[in-house]
Image (tube, rainbow, N blue to C red):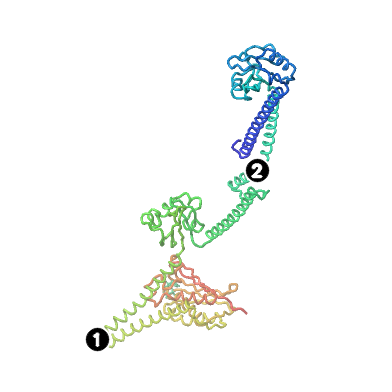
Amino acid sequence: MFKSIRWKFITVYFLLVFIAMIIVGIFIVKAFEDQQIKQTSESMESYVEKLLEYSSVVKNEDWNIEETKKSIKDTIKKWPLPTTDRIYIINNSPTNPVIIAANPNNENIIDTSAYENKEIEPQLFLGALNEGVNKQGLSVNKDNIRVKHLAYPVTSDEMGEVKGIIYMASDLKNITDTLDESKIILAKATLLALLITVTLGFFIARSITEPINDVTVKAEKMAEGDFNQYVDVKSNDEIGQLASMFNFLTDKLNSTISEMYREKSKMETLFNYMADGLLAVNDKGNIIHANPVALNILNFTYNDIIKIKFDDIFKDIDKNITLEYLTKEDSWEGAETIHIGKSTYRAKYAPFKNNSNEIGGLIIVFQDITEQHKLENMRKEFVANVSHELKTPITTIKSYSETLLDGAIDNKGLATQFLTVVNDECDRMTRIVRDLLQLSNFDFKEMKWDKSKLSINKLIESSYMKINMAAQEKNQSINIDIKDDLPKIYGDKDALEQVMLNILSNAVKYTPDEGQINVCAETKGENILVTIEDNGIGIPKEDLNRIFERFYRVDKARSRALGGTGLGLSIAKQIVAAHGGDITIESEYNVGTKVNLILPKENN
Ligand code: ADP
């Protein structure tokens, strides 16, 4: 309780007033006492002086003469004396001073030695005898009453010698009583002043401590997390300024917290919706943040991942991004290509700093580069395929032409045979280059279409005419089943015929002799569906989804032997897509293949 400012205030006020009152009281009482004693002393002196002035016997006569002694006694008896005072006329003998006269109540001590009288102080008496008036005497009698003493020497006129002493004693009881009363009044005043001081101090202290308490209570609430705390500003003094400053701090804190909250929520949204995976790990190896993409990549839930050590996950993925490795190498920034499942990621990592500006952990961003990786592989594969496809005919041409140059040219039959091979190989290269050029035109969108209204019947018919010969050679029969009222399509005749020819020629090529090929065309909603079905060698399931890739062939040797380039279906797919259609293939290995060609009907 006494630790509070309120009580400190009250105590200080109390002590200040108490000390002030005590000091003032002491001074007042002392001054009053001195003044009263001085007054008593002066009235005693004036009494003696008046006695001497009016009594010639006392003043002028010789005190040793018996008659004078008697006259003095009588004079004293008659001379009015205050009730509190006593008077003694003493002769001048320093060794044996005798009381010549005394006030009426003390007459019994007349003619006795002054030194035997308890009230007469020998020092004072002797002092007056030798040095003159002495009014310093002050004593306490047996009744505990303070007594003021005065010794007044009386000198004879002729000789100027001290003939005796007028000794007076006066009770100071009245003064003591008055002083005691004053002390009681002062004590009461002190008590009253202290009471007022404590009461006022209480209210003054409260006016100071209340706003401070208010600030303390609200600051405590803020420490507990409730930042919406304001205090009342009741004045413009230091306390008021403290309250204003507190409110200003609250505003500032609130705006800073809102700013931080906004930033945090911005960052959270950014992390949660970013396309890349993000993971933060502290220097102890605990995962402290993982966005949904990162969780998905690593196949963990958030609650699971925060329980697992970072290194335990990554040592099996790529040990080069484990904290153990990075700490050992002291290389905290870099990128690694990692493979998780069937996907490929670029993991870029960099450190973040802690409060002491040391490395506090690592942030890793996972970029999904699976597609890029696949494309890169496809590009490499494509270049390898092109080189390979061209290398074979070039090697053949080179070896045949060398043989011819070496002399085979002289043998006409052999030369014709060799030159036919060279010619075939040139045709083959021409086909490859033509197909590649066409694909390149698709890639660079430089294909020029000559679109017009087309009858699907005619398209199928003209393609059939071109392929029928090859089918007949293999004793295959081609059945065509087209609905008469098929609507027209809108497209490039040559390009679509190229598609039809490619599909039909594949059906002929990859169907053994005596095989059956059925071509149907019908309307399917807004499209025309052309199906080309054969009962040939079919395509194994695992190859089906790659069949439209460039240079992809189920059986390379067979395709090559049959004059295929492996580019036909990918070209066909691109042509059909450019017409707003699609090609799909259904096949069963060793049973047959069904190609679905979907083309949109012509509008109008
Ligand atoms: P290619 O010039 O080799 O025929 P395509 O792109 O036309 O190239 O065909 C790609 C591959 O698809 C062929 O090599 C073949 O393995 C397979 N294929 C296409 N059509 C058929 C089909 N009707 N029956 C069996 N396999 C086929």
Q: Quadrant of ligand 1?
A: bottom left
| SS at circle 2 | helix
Residue 407 tag number = 1
Please indicate, yes or no, whether residue 411 appears anywhere in the rendered image.
Answer: yes
3D distance between C-alphas at marks 1 and 2: 122 Å
Residue at 38% from the left image edge and 75% from the top image edge: 386
Q: Which residue is mark 2?
A: 210
Residue 538 tag number = none
- Where is residue 197? Give x, y as percent: 67, 36
Asked if residue 255 lies left or right of residue 476, the reply is: right
> In the depicted view, which residue is nearer to us: 140 or 222?
140
Please indicate, yes or no, whether residue 149 appears anywhere in the rendered image.
Answer: no
Q: Are marks 1 and 2 in contact (CB under 8 Å)?
A: no
Q: Tell me the amino acid under the disc marked 1.
A: Gly
> In the depicted view, which residue is nearer to us: 407 or 78?
78
- Where is residue 315? Give x, y as percent: 39, 54
Q: Above or below — where is 108 with respect to 553?
A: above
